[in-house]
Amino acid sequence: MRRSLSVPLAGLLLALVAAPAFAQPPTTPVPGPHDPNQPPASAPNGPQPLAHAVGDAGTGLSVVRLGPQGVPTNTILPGLGEQLPKQSVTEFGLGLASAQVNTEAFLSTERVVTQANPFGFAVAGRSPQSPGTLVQTAIPDNPRPANGGLPIPETPLAKLRLLNGSVHARWDEKVGPCVSPLATAKTSLAGLEVLSALPAEVPLPVKTSLITIPDTFEASSVVKLVDLPGSRNKAVESTSTMRAVSVELAGGIRIDVASPPTLTATATGDEATSKITYTAPVLKVSQNGKELGTLDAAHPTLDIPLLLDLVVIKLQIAGLNEKKAAFTGTGFSGFQLGATARMLDVQVLPTDKLKLPNLPAALAQISLGEQIVRAAAPQGGVICGTSQPPQTTVPQQPGAPVAAPPKGAPPLAYTNAAYESIPLFWTGTALLLAGVVIFAALPARRRSRG
């Protein structure tokens, strides 16, 4: 088990759930040479895996947004921020699990990255790094996962009882990502209270936490290679799953999770066969023992008044957003697709009925079960194999004649100055020795006395 305070991917999930589904994960860029004719900084040595694959899966147990859609999105391009959706004033995520596979990453330690993050936060879209992350990377391979408890942050927005994490990153030296399991990250908590210290301006009839999860709440993110029908090649599959039993809201509201959600992106390299699979959750809502309704794919929203219709809690599920596009990376060309979803959105004081401009969507929005997946595969699928190693020279037996190079073979190229250093050294030594001999052979001149 390794904990890191400066992992480049810390807080990855919180940044992804607030961004489009095709947001590139923050990996180290490939440094270019100063001279365009200069050879690359490094080259593969020995047999290399033939597999090319990119996949990401991120899952968050809970994300609290204060002032959702309240501030414009800042961009470096003029005018682009007006075209993008607005961001929350403040975001705070708990129990973040992310798995990432990128065979085209420049650093070998970024080929497979799995992490379980206890928390992450963002202010106006800016997300700093957060400490306490449980991380496992490959290369090299990790035969066993890393498990452990995660530090529980003290915050007035949420209270946790026990938070655990598990991460597993694999890589095979011969076939690369063609190994099972490949990338897995999980977080689980035993008890959660969200917005336990509400402002006095929020007139809830019961003085308690807005959301309470008394039972185990789990998030899982998995990236793996699966069989491609009718081919020896593989497809990239990114999956985000949630598992919960029940959720309790202020005002005696209880939500029983009859069926948890699952979001999967499968990339085959072809648009016709690549797909997004989403199993929407089924939630049964009751208040003080009285059934209010069921949230499912056919009925995704439900408004519950708490105080004379002035204070309203709005429940919403799914929120599925899909994107598909051609993929052109540094190592292969193919097809990519991605999607985001949420198991349950709880909005306090929604402002959609006020019809006033420049207002946030609600005073606060708590999302349970943030999910994001992305997958990209080359045309024809992922090839699981190894490149042929270069031909090796058979060692010569003692006394055997040395084979002469074939006629017409081009001379070996000079790759650096090391090949010129030896003759240059001996030439300089010879000139220095000749100078010493000449100087010693000359007659000495006597100085004239004045």
Image: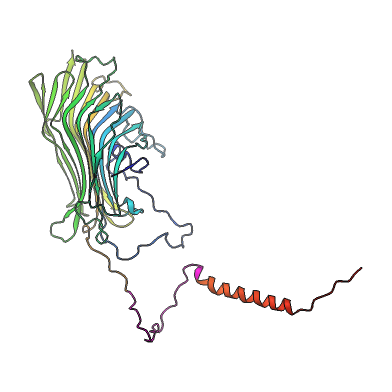
The x, y position of residue 283, in whole percent, is 12, 30
Q: What span is in magenta? A: 392-418
| Residue 299 screen position, x and y as percent | 12, 30
The residue positioned 27% from the left and 28% from the top of the image is: 64
Q: Nearer the viewer, residue 53 or 415?
A: 415
Magenta portion: prevailing SS class: loop
Question: Looking at the picture, does residue 199 appear above or below residue 414?
Answer: above
Quadrant of the rendered image containing residue 166: top left
Residue 321 vertical placement versus 430 (above, below): above
Quadrant for the N terminus, please. Answer: top left
| Between 150 and 262, the one nearer to me in the picture | 150
Quadrant housing residue 26: top left
* Among the 4 quarters of the image, the one containing residue 51: bottom left
Count of residue discs: 0
Decide whether residue 411 is among the magenta residues.
yes
Please name whichever residue, 241 or 214, is drawn nearer the observer in this view of the structure: 214
Instruction: Indicate the colouring scheme.
Output: rainbow
443 left or right of 114?
A: right
Whether residue 428 is visible to the viewer of this picture, yes or no, is: yes
Residue found 32% across the figure and 66% down from its top = 46
- Picture coordinates of residue 410, whole percent (x, y): 43, 78
Q: Is residue 403 above or below residue 245?
A: below
Q: Quadrant of the C terminus?
A: bottom right
> Which residue is situated farthest in the left direction here?
290
Residue 59 appears in the rendering: no
Q: Estimate the x, y position of residue 304 in percent, counting from the top left.
A: 16, 20
**Residue 19 is inside the magenta segment:** no
Q: Nearer the viewer, residue 439 or 389?
A: 439
- Name the residue rendered at 28%, 56% in the picture: 333
